[in-house]
């Protein structure tokens, strides 16, 4: 019986994180906690048992979304050629930042200066994009000498377009152009051009 309760608790926590993530994206981090609990089909007491404060919930959602973003790279690597996996992850990153920007600003105002929240999250994102770049570089499908931090800075600039009219769509287009630039002059593509 204890195991069933633990499984239920895990399911409730996961469901709360999913619903809160959607609510924060749609309504900002001040979204109603009561509405989140109701949408997750749990009582408000259950929400507070898992997340005693709004700050705790926002931080948990932030970590959860970074986990999803980084873990999704494994699936992409397993199912797509290396350059396509990188391109797909870049699109996911742009979409992620476009919907989560208010969350980071909120957390910076409430998280203590010595918290490892942002440092550990950024390290995971850097490691993820670095492994995708390495795989595509090793396959010869992107140009050599690409640095993960440089590409993240470029993508961050793309993400700023979300504030403009048509932002998310424009961000996706510019991320595709970035990927075209990474492929230009790549060994595999250069060989294909030379032989045609």
Image: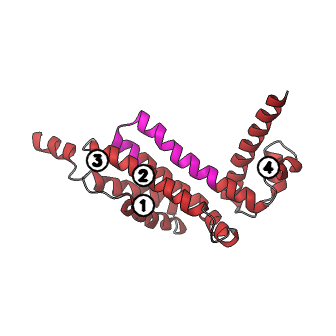
- Name the mark nearer the viewer: 4 or 1: 4
Can the viewer see residue 44? yes
Q: Which residue is under mark 2?
A: 129
Q: Position of residue 110 (x, y in %)?
A: 70, 70
User: Distance from label 3 to label 4 (Cα)?
Assistant: 43 Å
Q: How is the image coloured?
A: secondary structure
User: Distance from label 2 to label 4 (Cα)?
Assistant: 31 Å
User: Distance from label 1 to label 2 (Cα)?
Assistant: 8 Å
Q: Which residue is under mark 1?
A: 152
Dot 1 or dot 2, earlier in sequence: 2
In this view, the residue farthest toward the front is 114
Dot 4 or dot 1, earlier in sequence: 4
Dot 3 or dot 4, earlier in sequence: 4
Q: Residue at the spot x=77%, y=41% of the render?
A: 12
Dot 2 or dot 4, earlier in sequence: 4
Q: In the structure shown, which secondary structural element does the residue marked by tag 1 occupy? A: helix
Count neighbours of disc 3 (C-alpha within 10 A) and say few if under 14, some if 14 to 19, many if 20 or more. many
Q: Which residue is under mark 3?
A: 137
Q: Is residue 84 magenta?
A: yes
Can the viewer see residue 97? no
Apparent side of residue 151 relative to residue 194 in the rendered image (left or right): right
Residue range of the region highlighted in magenta in the rendering = 63-87
Which is nearer the eye, 153 or 184?
Answer: 153
* Above or below: residue 62 compared with residue 111: above
């Amino acid at each position: 019986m204890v195991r069933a309760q633990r499984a239920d608790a895990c399911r409730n926590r996961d469901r709360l994180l999913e619903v809160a993530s959607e609510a924060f994206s749609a309504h900002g981090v001040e979204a109603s906690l009561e509405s989140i609990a109701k949408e997750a089909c749990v009582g408000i007491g259950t929400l507070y048992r898992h997340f005693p404060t709004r700050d705790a919930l926002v931080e948990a959602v932030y970590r959860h979304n970074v986990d999803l973003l980084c873990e999704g790279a494994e699936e992409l690597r397993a199912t797509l050629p290396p350059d396509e996996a990188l391109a797909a992850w870049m699109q996911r990153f742009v979409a992620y930042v476009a919907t989560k920007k208010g969350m980071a600003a909120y957390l910076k105002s409430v998280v203590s200066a010595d918290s490892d929240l942002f440092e550990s999250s950024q390290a995971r994102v850097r490691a993820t994009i670095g492994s995708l770049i390495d795989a595509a570089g090793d396959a010869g499908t992107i140009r050599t000498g690409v640095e993960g931090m440089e590409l993240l800075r470029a993508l961050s600039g793309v993400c700023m377009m979300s504030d403009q009219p048509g932002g998310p769509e424009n961000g996706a287009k510019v991320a595709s152009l970035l990927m075209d630039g990474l492929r230009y002059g790549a060994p595999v593509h250069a060989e294909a051009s030379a032989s045609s």
